[in-house]
């Protein structure tokens, strides 16, 4: 059994730095353990006290009896290296460190980590809010012990954790299987705690609040393993630049790129939510219900307004409408005012229909006896029982949105007690539908599509190749056609090169390692229609740049045929600080930074994943061929993207590559501009890890 698992079920806990003062963590930990009903042994350690909360106090770690599985260290950070030595000597393999590194103590935190690893003592923290195992009645967090249940919570914020624990009695019948505050992840981190809860028989789903993850590859590996058998729901902070700054000041961890994190988490099976209030209900619904991979939903409402809002939200969240021969959303239009059981009648038809995979009910249900006549209570209760029976028999999910609260409402409480989610927020209701759909599709994937290589390469700057160098390198491996490019170094080459490229309009771009933004210095000319124009344009371009950029090294002018118009995309592979090398695909050209409409995946990718990336884009209609008589050639384009990604994985010295734009048309595609960043020899380093589920 691992030290973490032994500590999670500890029967002997030492509190080092125990205190007689109620305001100190060394007192609060002991009090929380006692109030939680912990029936194991608690050993306070304090050289100056005789008794704390009626417990005998030990003057040192060395004086403790044998067999302690877990130590809670409440001393200042500077004292911890010596404490860890004492713990190791006593055979204590796990310590919870609550100390928060102060200004200038980062090096001390590193010292604590290195000392712990050398001694073989594993750490939760530093700067942790503690941990709670309600099933073992262990509470090291000081807050009230939550009801023992089946949902695990791993949080990088004690306040977020507390807010969820306060939600639990109101919104969840599941309770918590455990809570761990990861703190600064000085040693153990999210990956370790996911592994713990994956093996924990009391846990059926996990909720994560994440700011930074440290080793992103190990984290994704554990998300992948966990999500194969149990749902994991993640709230990732750091979406805005302001939030990223707050994250760094709060935990000292690297927040990373939010979109990369969110996309990769979804790829490896996590459900990503955007608000703390959604963690608990999404985790609970995923632990109780499931939907087929197709994910076609029918909506039943008693008001047109709610139906319209739901329809918009379903489009926003990419939840698919069922096409089963019914209006969708289906508005009862007052039919249920005197006969609420009509809901059950409609649901009978819906759940029997093979074209419907799940149902959302929205409106007044549960409140007809309150709004119109209390005599309707019996009919609503009968309908609720039928809801439960139909959903269970068909093994299809049902989500109920009601204007009325569950508390004190026997109709809605009955549904909730049976595991049917009842919500008051339409947005949350649709997010539950989205979460169920994403989970169903994830579980249906072929395992080979989930094998990914996360490769972390040099963090140095490297060097950018000129576009001619980049194209030549790609041409050697068949990713660019040699006949589609030429390098012009003299004006008298115009006639031969114009003929070589098919005597068609050309684009000219200056080639210089010293000029990054070519158009800013007159280094781009488009639509050159003849050899004479080409010669003249070459002379003007070189002369102008030599005058304005006298220090620039000019290697010539790149010539390429003008690309026919079409949808402009960006395709790139970049090196993320946390996760290594990932593929980016999105709307490109001059819109790339303004729209910022991109998707990310870990490498390698297959055709289905590239198509998924396109369908994820908000402006995907442009990619498919908006207002064109023929759709764009997506299959050929996606196959090329797969080939580029595979090529990247085969290269040992490429840090980053970007094609912007790639112009997509009905009869093919053209990569117009390419950039490659190559690692310098001293920087070249590679760490390849295959994530398989």
Image (tube, rainbow, N blue to C red):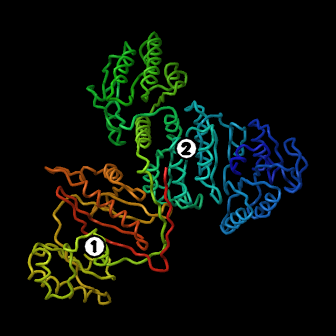
Above or below 579: residue 459? below
- Apparent side of residue 73 relative to residue 212 in the rendered image (left or right): right
Q: Nearer the viewer, residue 337 or 70?
A: 70
Q: Nearer the viewer, residue 53 or 513?
A: 513
Residue 475's disc is: 1
Across and down, in percent, residue 413 comes to: 53, 23
Instruction: Residue at 57% x, 38% y: name it.
Output: 204
Q: Are marks 1 and 2 in contact (CB under 8 Å)?
A: no
Across and down, in percent, residue 107 comes to: 67, 69
Across and down, in percent, residue 25 comes to: 75, 50
Q: Mark 1 falls on what kind of element?
A: helix
Circle 1 residues within 10 Å: few <14, some 14–19, many ≥20: some
> How many numbered discs sit on the rendered protein?
2
N-terminal-most mark, 1 or 2: 2
Query: Residue most toward the top?
Result: 375
- Apparent side of residue 628 relative to residue 646 in the rendered image (left or right): left
- Residue beneath label 2, please? 207
Q: Mark 2 falls on what kind of element?
A: strand
Across and down, in percent, residue 307 comes to: 32, 30
Point out the frontmost of discs 1 and 2: 1
Above or below 287: residue 673? below
Circle 2 residues within 10 Å: few <14, some 14–19, many ≥20: many
Instruction: Give the distance between the C-alpha atoms of the residues marked 1 and 2, in whole angstroms.
Output: 47 Å
- Apparent side of residue 613 relative to residue 74 in the rendered image (left or right): left
- Apparent side of residue 9 relative to residue 57 in the rendered image (left or right): left
The quarter holding residue 636 reads bottom left
The quarter holding residue 247 reads bottom right
The quarter holding residue 528 reads bottom left
Residue 378's disc is: none
């Amino acid at each position: 059994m691992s030290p973490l698992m032994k500590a999670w079920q500890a029967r002997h806990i030492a509190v080092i730095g125990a205190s007689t003062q109620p305001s100190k963590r060394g007192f609060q930990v002991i009090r929380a353990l006692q109030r939680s009903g912990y029936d194991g042994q608690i050993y306070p350690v304090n050289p100056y006290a005789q008794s704390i909360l009626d417990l005998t106090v030990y003057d040192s770690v060395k004086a403790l009896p044998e067999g302690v599985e877990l130590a809670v260290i409440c001393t200042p950070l500077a004292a911890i290296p010596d404490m860890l030595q004492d713990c190791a000597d006593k055979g204590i393999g796990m310590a919870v460190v609550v100390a928060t590194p102060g200004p200038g103590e980062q090096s001390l935190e590193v010292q604590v980590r290195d000392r712990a690893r050398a001694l073989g003592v594993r750490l939760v923290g530093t700067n942790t809010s503690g941990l709670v195992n309600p099933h073992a009645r262990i509470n090291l967090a000081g807050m009230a012990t939550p009801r023992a249940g089946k949902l695990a919570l791993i949080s990088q914020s004690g306040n977020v954790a507390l807010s969820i624990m306060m939600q639990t009695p109101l919104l969840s019948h599941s309770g918590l299987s455990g809570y761990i505050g990861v703190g600064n992840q000085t040693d153990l981190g999210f990956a370790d705690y996911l592994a713990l809860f994956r093996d924990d028989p009391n846990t059926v789903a996990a909720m994560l609040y994440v700011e930074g993850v440290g080793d992103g590859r190990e984290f994704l590996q554990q998300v992948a393993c966990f999500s194969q058998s149990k749902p994991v729901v993640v709230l990732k902070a750091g979406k805005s630049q302001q939030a990223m700054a707050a994250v760094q000041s709060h935990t000292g961890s690297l927040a990373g790129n939010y979109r990369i994190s969110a996309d990769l988490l979804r790829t490896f099976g996590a459900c990503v939510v955007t608000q703390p209030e959604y963690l608990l209900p999404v985790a609970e619904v995923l632990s109780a219900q499931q939907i087929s991979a197709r994910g076609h939903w029918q909506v039943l409402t008693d008001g047109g307004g709610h139906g319209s809002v739901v329809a918009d939200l379903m489009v926003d969240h990419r939840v698919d409408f069922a096409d089963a021969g019914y209006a969708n959303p289906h508005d009862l239009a007052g039919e249920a005012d005197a006969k609420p059981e009509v809901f059950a009648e409609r649901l009978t038809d819906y759940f029997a229909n093979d074209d419907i995979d799940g149902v959302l009910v929205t409106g007044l249900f549960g409140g007809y006896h309150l709004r119109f006549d209390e005599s309707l209570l019996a009919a609503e209760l009968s309908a609720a029982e039928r809801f439960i029976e139909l959903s269970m028999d068909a093994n299809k999910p049902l989500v109920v949105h009601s204007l009325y609260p569950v508390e004190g409402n026997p109709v809605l409480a009955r549904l909730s007690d049976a595991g049917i989610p009842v919500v008051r927020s339409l947005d949350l209701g649709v997010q539950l539908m989205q979460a169920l759909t994403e989970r169903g599709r994830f579980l249906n994937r072929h395992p080979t599509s989930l094998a990914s290589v996360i490769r972390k390469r040099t963090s140095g700057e490297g060097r950018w190749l000129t576009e001619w160098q980049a194209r030549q390198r790609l041409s050697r491996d068949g990713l660019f056609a040699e006949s589609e490019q030429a390098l012009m170094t003299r004006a008298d080459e115009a006639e031969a090169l114009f003929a070589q490229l098919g005597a068609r309009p050309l684009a000219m771009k200056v080639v210089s390692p010293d000029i990054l933004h070519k158009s800013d210095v007159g280094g781009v000319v488009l639509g050159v229609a003849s050899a004479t124009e080409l010669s003249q344009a070459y002379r003007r371009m070189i002369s102008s740049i030599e005058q304005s950029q006298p220090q620039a090294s000019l290697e010539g002018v790149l010539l390429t045929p003008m690309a026919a118009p079409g949808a402009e995309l960006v395709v790139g592979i970049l090196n993320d600080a946390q996760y290594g090398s990932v593929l980016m695909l999105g709307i490109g050209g001059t819109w790339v930074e303004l729209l910022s409409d991109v998707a990310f995946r870990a490498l390698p990718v297959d055709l289905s994943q590239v198509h998924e990336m396109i369908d994820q884009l908000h402006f995907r209609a442009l990619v498919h061929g908006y207002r064109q008589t023929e759709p764009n050639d997506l299959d050929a384009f996606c196959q090329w993207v797969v080939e580029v990604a595979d090529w990247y994985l085969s290269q040992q010295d490429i840090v980053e590559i970007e094609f912007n734009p790639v112009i997509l048309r009905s009869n093919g595609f053209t990569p117009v501009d390419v950039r490659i960043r190559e690692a310098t020899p001293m920087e070249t380093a590679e760490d390849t890890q295959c994530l398989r589920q």
